Image (cartoon, helix red, strand yellow):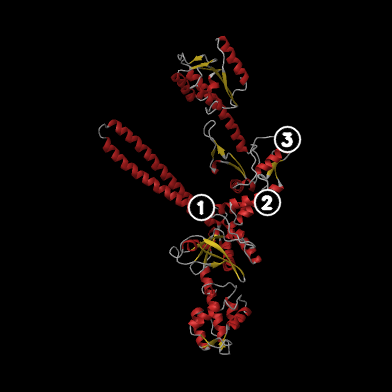
């Protein structure tokens, strides 16, 4: 059976353009002259000759095993434009005993005496590669200038009159901002995708399809009816929404090869190119959150507390100080409402044998502690900003850059030595026959030593990059942090965005004491220990309770009396939360239980004796200070430490 094969693609020479029908006509005319008939046709329309994974061609090769004896093509370029593969194909026809006729190139597989076949197939490949280079060069030139027109992403459209101008689509921009807000608030990709789908918000492909219909264009692109994780991730990854235009994000190394990502440093970047939908601060925060959640195996705030203004506000920054695992948010219904607290995940799931303590901390207490810490950091932060000198940064930057250059030079020298060593090894093996084992052992030892040196230098280089200050806008970041602190203090409360902007992590110890670490190295710059400050405030509260007891002239006291007086002094106390302090005073011998419910605690020690005990908690406290004076001087904020308070609940 006789078969004809025809092919056409975009990389063909337009001046010598030969259509599929013209190719068939030429083959039919030749076959008629030879007295044969083409029984079957195989064709590939719009497929490059550089690749051989073509439907028509693959079917032709499969049918060679069945009933095809002779194949006719117009010329070698129709068969393919890959030199090596075409030559291998010709050999395959001969090995199979099949007849291949290439009309314009006068080739007959039964007569392979033509010595110019390799030149012809090489020229065909050269043509397609040359065409590809010209196209790539033209595209790259436009990429460098930023004039390459690309399809605007979801949220943008081109101006109808001037296609070079990008405009924001208001409704789409609102949805993009919503995605960013939801992510910052603790939701993960899946939760956001489900929410957008439930709210019947159109997907990017639905919006694109609707726009194409309005413009009278019809495409075969698929349309997604539901939002997916990848759609949400693409929106959060794309800095186009900050006004940045990136070109040459992907490229291919070979003709018709697969596109590969181009490193960011090799891309063409144009900042402030078009109107921004997302501000750079919010975009940077999202990128930080993605890295943090990836490191901590964060899976989104799937346990958000209904009705809470701040659902799981601490997200992925809260950790157990002892085992390092994240703290799990817990919600419990109580007779008075709802209790929200955090507990060590390992302790909660595996028990005491894996982590000895619960590291429990109430959400309300934690929010208060963080707010107090931020307030106390403000004055120190102001001082750091005033005294920070950018010259110090520049000097450090130059020193680091010099060290980096020295390491780079040392690594290059060792690699060159390794190349010379391997070259010399090959020469010695050729010259000195019979001593191969000795030569291999000698050179292997030298090679191992050089590789070890290279590895050590590369580790130093990596460590230098990780520890070096990379941002020249440290002072600017400090000022931004101060702005956030001022807004928090003005509001008197925290939200998820505030926590993500300022706090790097919080480690909770076995007593429920949080150790707070701020971002941008602020905790290292600020000479303030929150644990010490909170313990000092706790000691002050103990001193106030003792002083109130000594001031009670009745000879006895009660929880109600102490609670009411603590409230008058500005403490948010209840009758129940004063009990741990009463228990402490009983342990110290200040109070003793009675059988009279109207006079529940008898005062055993004198005023002087109680004052002496107060000195253990506040050594520098003047003896004459009253409870009111102690609270006014020492308690600037009303947050309460939970060293003992947890025992009373």
Q: Nearer the viewer, mark 2 or mark 1?
A: 2
Q: Secondary structure at mark 2?
A: loop
CB within 8 Å, label 2 to label 3: no
Q: Residues within 10 Å of mark 3 (few under 14, many from 20)?
A: few
50 shown above or below 232: above
CB within 8 Å, label 2 to label 1: no
Q: Position of residue 316 (x, y in %)?
A: 54, 58
Q: Residues within 10 Å of mark 2 (few under 14, many from 20)?
A: few
> Which residue is under mark 1?
397
CB within 8 Å, label 3 to label 1: no
108 shown above or below 567: above
Q: Can you tell which mark lies on residue 106?
A: none
Q: Residue at 62% x, 71% y: name it.
A: 336
> Which residue is under mark 2?
199
Q: Nearer the viewer, mark 3 or mark 1?
A: 3
Q: Out of 466 and 547, give the one closest to the viewer.
A: 547
Q: Out of 39 and 361, give the one closest to the viewer.
A: 39
> Which residue is under mark 3?
216
Q: In this image, 488 relative to 534: left or right?
A: right
Residue most toward the left?
Answer: 434
Residue most toward the front?
Answer: 66
Q: Residue at 50% x, 51% y: name it.
A: 398
In 3D space, how far apart are the residues under numbered discs 2 and 3 (Cα atoms)? Answer: 28 Å
Give the tally of numbered discs.
3
258 shown above or below 358: above
Q: Nearer the viewer, mark 2 or mark 3?
A: 2
In primary-sequence order, the first of circles 2 and 3 is: 2
In primary-sequence order, the first of circles 3 and 1 is: 3
């Amino acid at each position: 059976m006789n078969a004809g094969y025809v092919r056409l693609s975009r990389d063909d020479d337009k001046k010598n353009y030969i259509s599929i029908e013209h190719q068939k006509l030429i083959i039919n005319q030749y076959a008629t002259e030879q007295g044969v008939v083409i029984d079957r046709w195989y064709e590939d329309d719009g497929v490059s000759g550089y690749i051989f994974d073509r439907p028509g061609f693959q079917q032709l090769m499969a049918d060679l095993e069945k009933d095809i004896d002779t194949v006719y093509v117009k010329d070698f370029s129709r068969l393919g434009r890959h030199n090596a593969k075409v030559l291998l194909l010709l050999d395959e026809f001969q090995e199979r005993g099949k007849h291949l006729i290439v009309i314009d190139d006068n080739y007959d597989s039964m007569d392979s005496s033509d010595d110019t076949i390799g030149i012809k197939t090489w020229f065909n490949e050269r043509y397609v590669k040359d065409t590809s280079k010209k196209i790539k060069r033209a595209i790259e030139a436009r990429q460098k200038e930023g004039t390459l027109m690309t399809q605007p992403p979801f949220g943008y459209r081109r101006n109808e009159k001037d296609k070079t101008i990008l405009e924001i689509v208001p409704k789409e921009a609102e949805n993009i901002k919503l995605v960013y807000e939801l992510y910052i608030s603790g939701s993960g990709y899946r939760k956001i995708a489900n929410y957008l789908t439930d709210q019947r918000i159109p997907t990017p492909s639905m919006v694109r399809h609707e726009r194409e219909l309005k413009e009278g264009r019809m495409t075969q692109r698929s349309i997604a009816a539901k939002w997916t994780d990848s759609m949400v991730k693409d929106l959060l990854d794309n800095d186009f929404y900050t006004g940045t235009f990136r070109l040459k994000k992907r490229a291919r190394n070979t003709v018709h090869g697969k596109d590969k990502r181009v490193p960011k440093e090799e891309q063409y970047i144009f900042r402030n190119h078009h109107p921004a939908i997302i501000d750079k601060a919010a975009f940077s925060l999202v990128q930080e959150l993605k890295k943090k959640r990836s490191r901590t195996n964060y899976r989104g705030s799937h346990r958000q507390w209904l009705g809470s203004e701040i659902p799981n506000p601490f997200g992925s920054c809260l950790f157990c100080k002892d085992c390092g695992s994240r703290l799990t948010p817990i919600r419990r219904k109580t007779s008075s409402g709802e209790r929200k607290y955090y507990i060590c995940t390992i302790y909660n799931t595996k028990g005491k044998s894996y982590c000895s303590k619960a590291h429990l901390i109430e959400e309300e207490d934690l929010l208060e502690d963080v707010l107090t810490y931020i307030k106390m950091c403000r004055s120190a932060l102001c001082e750091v900003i005033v005294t920070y000198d950018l010259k110090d940064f520049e000097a450090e930057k130059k020193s680091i850059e010099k060290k980096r250059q020295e390491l780079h030079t040392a690594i290059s020298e060792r690699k060159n030595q390794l190349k010379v060593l391997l070259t010399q090894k090959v020469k010695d093996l050729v010259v000195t026959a019979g001593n191969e084992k000795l030569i291999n052992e000698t050179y292997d030892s030298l090679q191992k030593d050089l590789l070890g040196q290279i590895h050590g230098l590369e580790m130093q280089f990596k460590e230098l990059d990780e520890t070096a200050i990379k941002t020249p806008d440290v002072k600017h970041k400090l000022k931004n942090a101060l702005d956030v602190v001022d807004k928090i203090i003005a509001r008197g409360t925290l939200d998820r965005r505030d926590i993500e902007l300022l706090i790097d992590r919080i480690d909770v110890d076995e007593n429920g004491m949080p150790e707070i670490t701020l971002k941008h190295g602020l905790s290292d710059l600020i000479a303030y220990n929150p644990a010490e400050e909170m313990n000092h405030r706790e000691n002050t509260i103990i001193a106030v309770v003792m002083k109130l007891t000594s001031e009670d002239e009745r000879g006895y006291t009660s929880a109600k009396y102490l609670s009411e007086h603590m409230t008058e002094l500005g403490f948010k106390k209840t009758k129940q939360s004063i009990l741990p302090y009463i228990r402490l005073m009983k342990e110290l011998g200040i109070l003793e239980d009675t059988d009279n419910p109207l006079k529940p605690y008898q005062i055993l020690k004198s005023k002087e004796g109680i004052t002496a005990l107060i000195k253990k908690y506040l050594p520098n406290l003047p003896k004459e200070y009253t409870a009111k004076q102690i609270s006014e001087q020492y308690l600037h904020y009303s947050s309460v430490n939970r060293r003992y308070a947890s025992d009373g609940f």
